[in-house]
Amino acid sequence: MKLICYILLILLIPTIPVGAQTLSGGQVQVSNQSILISDNGQVMIGMDITLPTAMELSSNCVATLTPVLKTQDNSYNRILPAIWVYGRIRSIVQQRERSIPSDAYTILRRKNGTEQTVNYSARIPYEKWMNGAELELLADVRGCVNCQKEESSAFVTRANLERYVVKPAVAFVSPAVEAVKNRAEEGRAYLDFPVNQTRIYPDYRRNPSELAAIKRTVDVVKNDANTTITEIDIVGYASPEGRYAANARLAQGRAEALKNYVMSEYGFKADLFKVNSVPEDWAGLREYVTKNALPLKDEILSIIDKNENDYDVKEGCIKALDGGKVYATLLQDCYPALRHSDYTVRYVVRGFNVEEAKQIIRTRPQQLSLQEMFLVAQTYEKGSNEFNEVFDVAVRMFPDDPTANINAAAIELQRGDLQQSVRYLDKADAQASATLNNRGVLKLLQGDLDSAESYFKQAQAKGSVEAGANLEEMVNKRKDDAIFGK
């Protein structure tokens, strides 16, 4: 509904938003009021001012209707050209005396009993104080000897001259089709063996829980109709305790024992397995020492990093530190965790149509390809929560994929999280048109228009449609800055 306000033309009253008093039984009506700003910095003021049928003006009187744009405290104001309304006799006298004002917006002779409307419009140069200023209409009625009979004012509208809000176009990349979806489930088992033995005893110490964890990993893949196991990798590790040759035998033998256990549990063939071993887990030892506060820590690391191919010599050097106390600490606190078997269940996943993929993304998103996720996103409204969540999942499943990162960056730019968008952009293909465009969007949102324009031009040269649209946004933004200032 359009806002209509009535100008009170009898009593001297404060500014009011909407009201009605009579002027000889009538009202002045204001409608279709607007205050806009043009591209060249001109403030455009418009309204329809109507003298209704019921409003009568005495024949000897003159009324002026003067729009005024002002701040609330009236510290700044701009008086606009007035509308002069003459009674019949007053109009004749003014014409005869040639005293009609030359700066009037328009001059009317009041025809009592009829409706008269003035389509008022004015343009003035923009000044900073005008944003938020109030537009008032002042009414003044004078008699035959210019004695003031009536004066009033009314609020018409407020100048909400909003800054141009850039609406940059981010770029998304459609991922390539993943011909074969190879996936893997990984785990680490800490099986317990009697000293110097390689046979697995399922009920021995921690073995029930460790073997159950292995079976759960295998079952997740084996029992899923969408997947087919292609290989199971097992790597056995021993701790650097005792002779290297003995540890090599234990590490390989225990890895083989785990293979045989899984084969017997599931009836898998031997050629499904790939078994390797690391006789002594020196890398794991170094990681432990690095992360923990230990006596003689630097000396331990120096021994580990020593260019010495005889690992038994290295072990002897550690044993010699502080009379064997360092070695005893490692033996108790570190070495048990260095005896482990790492396993990887490799498998392929069948392809899914869009409706299937919409269900899978909620339960097993790792089974989808980036391209399948992208197609799911296209079924949702762009910018919706569902649309955005698909790309969040995609980058979580494929954290190092350039396409996943450029699309995730686009989502964060739309959300306004510029810091997170940078993290994703840094992992995208730096020279791809989508990356260049989205970096331009980032710079635009940061207010660096020159850098933004450079990125957009580079992206446009590589065929980016979005960059072309963004260059148009740049024109509008620069115009806005020229009017309002940065």
Image: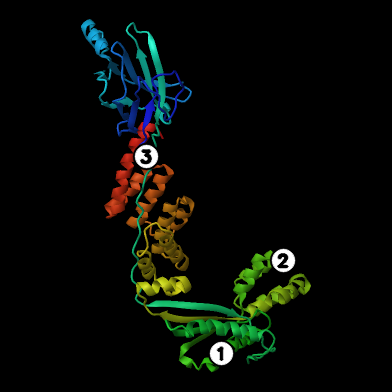
| Residue topped by disc 1 | 256
Assign a secondary structure to mark 3. Answer: loop
- Compared to 320, does 273 lie above or below? below
Q: Position of residue 484 (x, y in %)?
A: 39, 32
When asked about the image quadrant of residue 7, the answer is top left
- Compared to 80, does 291 lie above or below? below
For the residues labelled 1 and 2, the Cα–Cα distance comes to 35 Å
| Mark 3 or mark 1: whose residue is earlier in sequence | 3
Check disc 1 and give the amino acid type. Glu
Q: Nearer the viewer, residue 316 or 67?
A: 67
| Residue topped by disc 2 | 294
Q: In the visual, does 448 lie left or right of 281?
A: left
For the residues labelled 3 and 1, the Cα–Cα distance comes to 69 Å
For disc 2, the neighbor class at 10 Å (few under 14, some 14 to 19, many from 20) is some
| Residue topped by disc 3 | 164
For the residues labelled 2 and 3, the Cα–Cα distance comes to 61 Å
Assign a secondary structure to mark 1. Answer: helix
Give the mark toward the camera: 3 or 1: 3
Q: Position of residue 334 (x, y in %)?
A: 68, 74
Which residue sits at x=31%, y=40%? 475
Assign a secondary structure to mark 2. Answer: loop
Check disc 2 and give the amino acid type. Leu
| Mark 1 or mark 2: whose residue is earlier in sequence | 1
Task: Confirm or deny contact between disc 3 and disc 1 (CB under 8 A).
Answer: no
- Compared to 271, does 190 lie above or below? above
When asked about the image quadrant of residue 12, the answer is top left
Q: Position of residue 200 (x, y in %)?
A: 63, 91
Give the mark toward the camera: 1 or 2: 1
Give the mark toward the camera: 2 or 3: 3
